[in-house]
Amino acid sequence: MTDDHCHDRSPCRATCDRAASRRAFLRDLGIAAIGSIAATTMLPSDAWGATVEMLTPLARRQGEVAYPIPKGDGVQFDEATGVILVRWQQHLYAFSSECPHRGATLTYLAAENRIYCRKHKARFAPDGAWQSGRQTSALDRFPLRLDAGQALVRVDAPLEAERDPAGYAAASAGVP
């Protein structure tokens, strides 16, 4: 038996057209849903939320990366170097974008003003202190200093709060 009967204007043709249209609609809907899920869970710019900006270094020299000093409180992310720059309560911090537990990529929960590890459900305050979720250490901080209107971040020397408490505490800068 062939499908020749569907190539005319019979009632069967109308049914076949509706079935094909429905299949195409469901296929397109599925593709859109998968694209939407990928966009909301995989792209760093989306993962960081509305208060987060992508950050571009001004210069790189001898283990330091220069960034503009943020004008107000917020979170900036440099995907290329894995630096999270946070300005919060008149302080500037630079963190590694990797969870200190197992290196999972961190995100930002804008509604909670918390840095978040999706893998461990750990939440960190804007100053890097662990707050909730799987017990882990504070976020690794990069030493930074301010010079000529720039934040100079030493990306080759991350500091751990537990191993070097004094160095960790000093790895921030006051900003007006």
Image: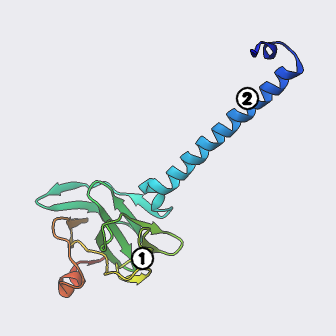
The answer to whether 117 is drawn above or below residue 3 in the figure is below
Query: From the viewer's perspective, is the residue at label 2 or at label 1 nearer?
Result: 2
Q: Which residue is mark 2?
A: 20
Q: Image quadrant of residue 19?
A: top right
- Say which residue appears at 41% left-offset and 59% top-offset: 53
CA gap, disc 2 and disc 1: 47 Å
The quadrant of the rendering that contains the C terminus is: bottom left
Location of residue 46 in the rendering, given as x and y in whole percent from the top left corner: 48, 56
Relative to residue 162, is residue 35 drawn left or right?
right
Q: Residues within 10 Å of mark 2 (few under 14, many from 20)?
A: few
- Say which residue appears at 60% left-offset and 47% top-offset: 33
Q: Image quadrant of residue 18?
A: top right
Kindly identify which numbered label has been placed on residue 122.
Answer: 1
Q: Secondary structure at mark 2?
A: helix
Given residues 57 and 36, the one toward you in this image is 36
* Kind of residue sitting beneath label 1: Ala
Location of residue 61 in the rendering, given as x and y in whole percent from the top left corner: 13, 57
Do the CB atoms of the residues marked 2 and 1 lie less than 8 Å apart? no
Location of residue 74 in the rendering, given as x and y in whole percent from the top left corner: 42, 69
What residue occupies the far front of the structure in this picture? Answer: 1
- Say which residue appears at 33% left-offset and 67% top-offset: 85
The answer to whether 72 is drawn above or below residue 15 in the figure is below
* Kind of residue sitting beneath label 2: Ala
